[in-house]
Image: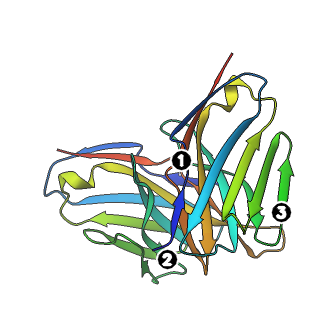
């Protein structure tokens, strides 16, 4: 069955550093990948979408890559801040079906 | 701004009770979804609807039903709640881009945390 895996359950970094989160997919080829942010007790909020024919996409301090050879997406937050602390979810879409990863809990320490 | 409203943020119900979770959107959008989110399992799709009175099973529909009598409202029904249905329930819609087409990303409500005792 199609699977999205976010390798790290938790990631801790210092303020100002770049956070890099990994998302791998298996048993399918998503047409696009999406990243969401989720704060405790709240619904996920959409951040970025990248299509399979796009290598990289940026939005302010956020950058997403899509490597179809490695079957992987990387999500970067540059100049991280404590306010970036949250759970980040990766999701892949293929033929209209969206499959979510389990999420990575990012903590940015001051 | 897109608004997806879930009627109850927190509910506590007893085993065997019938539970209704309501979701209302103000976007006049066709596609609406119900997910549940559990630690270690991520978000799993229960049901979705692509139009009034239309519904499709997701990955885990057992023990649930849905109702979409009006475009803006999508209800999730637990006919007889069980303790393994204790979870966070999330309603979502497909966002419509500036071209008016579905852009793929989902817009979520704030969630309904259900505890079944």
| Disc 1 from disc 3: Cα separation | 22 Å
Q: Chain of mark 3?
A: A
Along the line of sight, the residue nearer the viewer: B34 or A34? A34
Residue B2 visible (yes or no): no
Mark 2 Cα within 10 Å, few/some/many (few <14, many 20+)? many
Same chain for marks 1 and 3?
Answer: yes
Task: Please determine whether, in this image, residue B111 is positioned above or below residue B23.
Answer: above
On the rendered structure, is A10 left or right of A14? left
Q: Residue B53: horizontal and vertical position, in percent?
A: 45, 83
Quarter of the figure with the C terminus of chain A: top right
Q: Mark 1 and mark 2 in contact? Answer it, CB < 8 Å.
A: no
- Residue designated by label 2: B49
The residue located at (31%, 65%) in the rendering is: B77
Query: Badge 1: how crowded within 10 Å, few (<14), some, or many (20+)?
Result: many
Within the image, what quadrant is residue B115 found in?
A: top left
**Residue at the farthest front position:** A70
x and y percentages locating residue A105 in the rendered image: 55, 37
The residue that appears at 28% across and 49% down in the rendered structure is B86
The N terminus of chain A - image quarter: bottom left
Name the mark nearer the viewer: 1 or 2: 1
Which residue is situated farthest in the top direction here? A110
Q: Residue at x 76, y 76 (%)?
A: B101
Q: Secondary structure at mark 3?
A: loop
Along the viewing direction, whichever of A24 and A15 lies nearer the viewer:
A24
Q: Name the residue at the left extreme.
A: B16
Callout 2: helix, strand or loop? strand
A37 left or right of B88?
A: right
Q: In the rendered image, which residue does mark 1 sit on?
A: A103
B48 with respect to A31 (left or right): left
Q: Which residue is mark 3?
A: A55
């Amino acid at each position: 069955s199609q699977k999205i895996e976010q390798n790290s359950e938790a990631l801790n970094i210092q303020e100002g550093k770049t956070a890099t989160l990994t998302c791998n997919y298996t048993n399918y080829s998503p047409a696009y990948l999406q990243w969401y942010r989720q704060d405790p007790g709240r619904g996920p909020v959409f951040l970025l979408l990248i299509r399979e024919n796009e290598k990289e996409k940026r939005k302010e301090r956020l950058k997403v890559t899509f490597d179809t050879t490695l079957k992987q997406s990387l999500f970067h937050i540059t100049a991280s801040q404590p306010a970036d602390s949250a759970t980040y979810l990766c999701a892949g879409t293929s033929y209209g079906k969206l499959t979510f990863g389990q999420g990575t809990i990012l903590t940015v320490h001051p | 701004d897109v608004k997806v409203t879930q009627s109850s943020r927190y509910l506590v119900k007893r085993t065997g009770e019938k539970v209704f979770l309501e979701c209302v959107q103000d976007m006049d959008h066709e596609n609406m979804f119900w997910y549940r989110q559990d630690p270690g399992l991520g978000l799993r799709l229960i049901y979705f609807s692509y139009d009034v009175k239309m519904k499709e099973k997701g990955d885990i529909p057992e023990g649930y039903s849905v109702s979409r009598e009006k475009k803006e409202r999508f209800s999730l029904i637990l006919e007889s709640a069980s303790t393994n249905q204790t979870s966070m329930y999330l309603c979502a819609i497909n966002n419509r881009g500036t071209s008016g087409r579905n852009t793929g990303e989902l817009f979520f409500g704030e969630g309904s945390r259900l505890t079944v005792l």
